Each structure stands twice: as C-alpha cells, then as structure tokens.
Image (spheres, grey):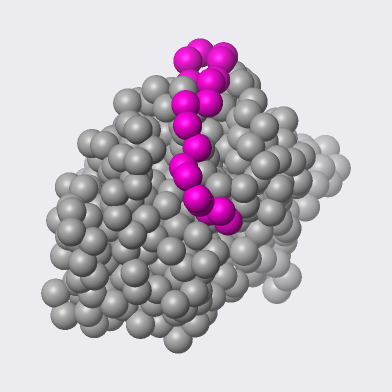
Amino acid sequence: MDRTAKVIAIDGTELFTIEAGSPVMFTAFSPDATQIVTACEDGSIRTWRADTAQPIWSFLGHDDAVWNGAFDAAGTRLAAASRDGIPRVWDVRYTGHVTLTGHRGNVWSSAFSSDGTRIATSAADGTVKVWDAGGNLKTTIAAGTTEFGMAAFSPSGAELAIASPSGASVYEISGATSRLRFALEGERRVTYLAYDPAGSHLATTTEQGSLRSWDAGTGKLLRQLDGHEDAIWYVTFSVDGKTIVTASQDSTARTWDAETGKQLRTFDHPLIVGAAELSADGTSLVSGGEDRLVRIWSVATGKVIATLEGHMAVVSTIDSSPNDRMIVTASHDGTVRLWDLETRSQLATIDSQASPFYSAHFSPDGRKVVATSGQGRVNVWPVPDRVPRETIEHLVRCRVPVRLRRSDTRPCGSRNAHVAQPGNR
C-alpha cells in the first residue's frame, strides 16, 4: 500500500495525486467539495484544498489507524473512527490563512496587539513592520534586526518595544505613523523583551545573560536580576504580572519575583531552553528547547509532570491560549503544533514545507495563531475548535462505530465516488 490518494475526474482522467505521508485508509470530499480529507494508517487526519491538493491542516490525536469517518451536513466537522477504539470529532472548517507579504529573509518574531487588530513582525531585512489583522501593511520601522530581533505591543497598543543587536527602543504607534520615544540606556544585544500585563514594566534579556526590569513609561532602569550564566533567549510575565519567567542558553528556565527581583525557582534541562511560560493559575510551567521536547513542570515541586513529544528540532517558541486549555509551539523542524493541555495530546500541525518556524503566538481571543518562518513568511492561521466528546452523537449524519474491522471501511455518504485510494477501491 502506497501513501497517496488520487483525485480522478468522472471521465477517468487523473487530476492530481495527494502525498499523504502514510498509507491512506479513508478519503472524502467535504459537502461543498472545497476540501478533501484523508485518514491514514498512522492515525493522522489531513485536509487538502480540492482544487490544488495543497495541505490545509493536519489533525493528530488518534493512537492507531483511522478506518472511517463521516461529515456532518454542514461540512464543518468530521467524525472519525479509529482502531484505537475512541471516536473523535474534528472541526475542519479552516480552509486557508492570511499571508503577510513584504519582509525579505527570515522573520524572527510576531505579536498581536491586545485588541487583536494589529500584528507586529521583525525580520532579517532589518525592519519591524506593523500590519492590520487582514494582512495590510500599516508602517515600517528601520530597526536593525538583521541578526535577530523581536517586537512587542504595550498592553494599550499605543507603543511598540523593539529588541535588536543594537539595543532596545520604544516607539509610539498611531495609524500608519511611528515615532521613537526612547532607547533603553546601556542595552546591547537584546534578545527578547516583554511588557507586564499592566504596561508599567518592561523586561529585557541579552546575549550576555542579563535580565533587567525598566519603567515602561520613562525607560528608567528599575533593577537587574542576576542568576543566568549564559544568553537568555526568552522572557515573559505571568498573567497576574507578579512573576517573570526566563529561558536560557545555560540549560535552565527560571522564575523571578517581579517586584523584588528575587529568584524563585530553577528548572534544569539537559540542553538549551528556548522558551518557557507559566500557566494562568501559576501552578505549572511549560518549557521547550534544543532537546525537541515540550515539558510541563509543577511550579510547587520543580518536577516534570508530563512530556510532549513530536517536534524533530529545536522548540523556539511556546504560547498559551487565553483560556489556558491549549499551547502552541514553533520549531526549527518547520512545524507549528497545537497541543491540548487537558489530554496532553497534539490537536493539529502546521507544516511550512521546508523553512524553520521562529515564533508562533495566539491572538488575544485565542481564535488565530500568527507564525513566522524563513523566506519572509508570516502567516495567520485560524485555530480548530475543541469539541466536547459528549456532543459527538449530535454532530454526524450517520453512526460511526466505536470499533471497526478492516472489512467495515465503507464510506458514509456518496462524495467519495471520485476519489480513488490504494487498498480500498
């Protein structure tokens, strides 16, 4: 059995071949015929554009081969039956994404404004760009982000802080205009920065391993937090603003008291840590880095309570959804992955088809993810819904058995008629 599905016209002409990556057990058109779904022996479900065979989403969660499935009447959800014995319902409404075109070279970072109407990106072309949520360019700032860099909106959205090899600066942003307010004195090789939720403090990190807290309104240095022994690649505040979280080249993630600067706890890793973030309730910390694993830690004990596997290269960014039920991770393996924190399983994967992903972040409403990668690419993707298991029976047009035998792989509905697949013709 090969790993393809073929789309064939009624007259028998082969239109194109879908490379599914695993032996294909089931295929179907969506009711509006705009998408094709493939279900595979490796447990994956993928959606593809019906006119071009370009991939849209990968849905990961089944632990064994997916034998069969059925669309609901609206074509928004697919109920899938797997050899793992657990029926699942997937939201497959997401037919595309917004591409922000204008950068040249690697795009280092991306961030939504707090109201979700604007996106800031930094890139190796030395610029930071501000876009509206529809992908229209509003303003460009020459920021010197050639080697690395990032930008973050203040909570009010009126200001934009930029980190770069030359230092850190804060700009006023209004419509299509920008104006430099101040540069942070003495800062060089600034790798990352973050505002606290109140917008009163700004934390910065450097390649030299320094962590500093600044008055976000005046640019005055408030305190330096010592402890890391190498470059710090990531910094963020907890939801309540009381804790600072850092990730470092010294193979640790650390938490700090934002008010006093006291170090609270160290989380030791075997290799470089690329990103770390606290849960909304402050009880757990999620980290990722060079060893390709995503770890969930107990803040109280400092022990690992779960490990999420799937990435094949450095994990560069982690971000929690606003409701704290999902995280999104970006990796140099060319994928962005969505994870369910309740089940600790993958929900979906975005594949860049080649370039590493440098960042991925949720929009403030949790409905979108903005991701940046190489070759000037910035994409905004919708986020699939989590569907409660108790609603499964109400979402399908025909009953899908909990367990299916190999001989039970008959499609529900007739829209499979023109999709041929190896081993199930």
Image position of 14 (left or right of 187): right
Above or below 7: residue 302: below
Residue 373 visible from this viewpoint: yes
Relative depth, front residue between 233 and 315: 233
Q: Quadrant of residue 139?
A: top right
Relative depth, front residue between 420 and 327: 327
Q: Bounds of the magenta span?
A: 173-190
Relative depth, front residue between 232 and 342: 232
Residue at the (71%, 48%) spot, across then down: 146
Q: Estimate the x, y position of residue 75 in percent, counting from the top left.
A: 45, 35
Q: Quadrant of residue 153?
A: top left
Instruction: Tell me the quadrant of the picture where the C terminus can be found.
Output: bottom right
Instruction: Tell me the quadrant of the picture where the N terminus can be found.
Output: bottom right
Q: Residue furthest right?
A: 13
Q: Estimate the x, y position of residue 299 in percent, counting from the top left.
A: 19, 71
Q: Is residue 175 magenta?
A: yes
Q: Quadrant of residue 276?
A: bottom left
Residue at the (72%, 36%) spot, across then down: 103
Residue at the (56%, 70%) spot, across then down: 314
Q: Estimate the x, y position of residue 311 in percent, counting from the top left.
A: 53, 70
Q: Is residue 230 magenta?
A: no
Q: Residue furthest bottom?
A: 270
Image position of 300 (left or right of 183): left
Above or below 36: residue 298: below
Residue 315 visible from this viewpoint: no
Q: Estimate the x, y position of residue 406 in percent, counting from the top left.
A: 50, 72
The image shows a total of numbered marks equal to 0
Residue at the (59%, 72%) spot, across then down: 313
